[in-house]
Image: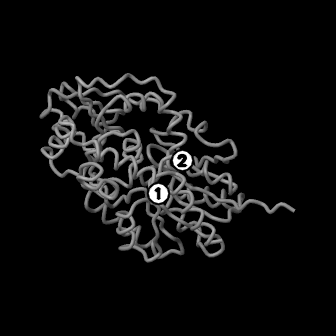
Amino acid sequence: MVERKKKILFIVEAMGGGVFTYVSDLANELVNTYDMFVAYGVRSQTPADFKKYFDERVHLIRVPNFKRSISPIKDIIAYFEIRDIARRIEPDIIHLHSSKAGALGRFAFNGKKVPVFYTPHGYSFLMENHSVIKRFIYRAIEIVCGKRNCTTIACSNGEYQETLKLSKHADYVNNGINILEFEKIINDIETNSKNDDELVVFTLGRISYQKNPAMFNEIAQKMPQVKFVWVGDGELRNQLTSPNITITGWLDRRTALTVANAAHIFVLTSLWEGLPISLLEAMYMKKLCIVSDVIGNRDVIRSGYNGYVCNIVDEYVQGINNYASKGTEQLISNAYQDILDDYNIDVMTKKYKKIYQSSI
């Protein structure tokens, strides 16, 4: 008699950006061992064709009232929606992804009969675009929820250290990229050969307060001889005024990677992060990575070893100039090796399987 596969239910409100890549990659790997279900919400940055990114064996269930912002009525309805989904599926493990799913899910499920896990993907109370009062409320919610019978699995060591301030039930598994799948895309795309006569610096993501487009613009203004590219779009695109900046708008994954692969340097000026998938992908594509000194970024990039960690505009400028002087080959090589050793889907999946199995 064949033993039935254990069922894992992912509940994710933030179905966009790096969280989407993380959830789809992890679900696709785990489906070989577990019966996988993903209850999700739709955001503006959710790919229109998101279903094709999932293995056909992964069951996708929409939560209609999952919304990013706080909405008491819709949040209450979403609370009952995820409870009903779990009742119908009868999962052996529930894993909550993102702050909204984490808050609702930790009250919807007591974690006594079914183990419950939660991954923040960047705590809301660390987001500097929120007021002091809102951040205080978000932290208070995390503290209260942290007392529930649930284990928080951070996606970086920095996020893990923040978690320990909120709950003793904590662990961490570094984000990782699917190297085999990523390599197929890179090998398949038609990319222009890098033109060494024109240095190209790029970043990728929503043009929002979090990504600090004002600083990106200031760096570009100080280096008029360098071409800067922002792959993405957003509400603060009017802050990118330097004439040497190109904004691509939102692109499908293949096209975005084509642009990225033709560039030389990846810059991330974020005010906060979890552990950005875009950074890991840039490291694997052998781009010099120059990032802000925040949780997630500094967990991966060790300044002077596999990239540069910066606090001010002039440090970014110096890092870019270092590349131009051909002094960064070893940093790029070290970053690439770190992906092969630590930040890939195989390592990540093995750690999750171990955590899940020990909980059942």
Instruction: Determine which of the numbered discs, if any, sits on residue 318 in the image.
Output: none
Q: Residue at x 47, y 75 (%)?
A: 169
Residue at the disc numbered 2: 41
- Foreground pick, 199 / 295: 199
Observer-nearest residue: 192 or 160? 192
Give the crowd class for mark 1: few <14, some 14-19, many >=20 residues within 10 Å.
Answer: many
Q: Circle 1 is placed at which residue position?
A: 100
Q: Mark 1: which amino acid?
A: Lys
| Figure check: 215 above or below 357 | above
Tell me what residue is drawn at x 34 percent, y 65 percent: 137
Quarter occupied by residue 92 = bottom right
In the picture shown, does residue 324 fall above or below 10? above
> Element under label 2?
loop
Q: Which amino acid does label 2 sit on?
A: Gly
Residue extending farthest right: 1
* Mark 1 vs mark 2, CA separation in Å: 10 Å
Contact (CB < 8 A) between labels 1 and 2?
Answer: yes
Chain-order first, disc 1 or disc 2: 2
Figure check: 25 above or below 109: above
The spot of residue 122 in percent (x, y) is: 38, 57
Task: Point out residue 29 in the picture as x, y percentages from the top left corner.
Answer: 61, 51
Q: Position of residue 95 (x, y in %)?
A: 56, 61
Quadrant assignment, res 332: top left
The residue lying at 51 percent from left, 36 percent from top is 47
Q: Where is residue 357 in the image (x, y as percent from the top left)?
A: 63, 68
Q: Horizontal placement of 323 versus 87: left or right?
A: left
Left/right placement of residue 171 relative to residue 129 reads right
Residue found at x 39% / y 67%: 160
Local packing at callout 2 (Cα closer than 10 Å; few below 14, some 14-19, many 20+) is: many
SS for tag 1? helix
Which image quarter is the C terminus in?
Answer: bottom right
How many labels were placed on the picture?
2
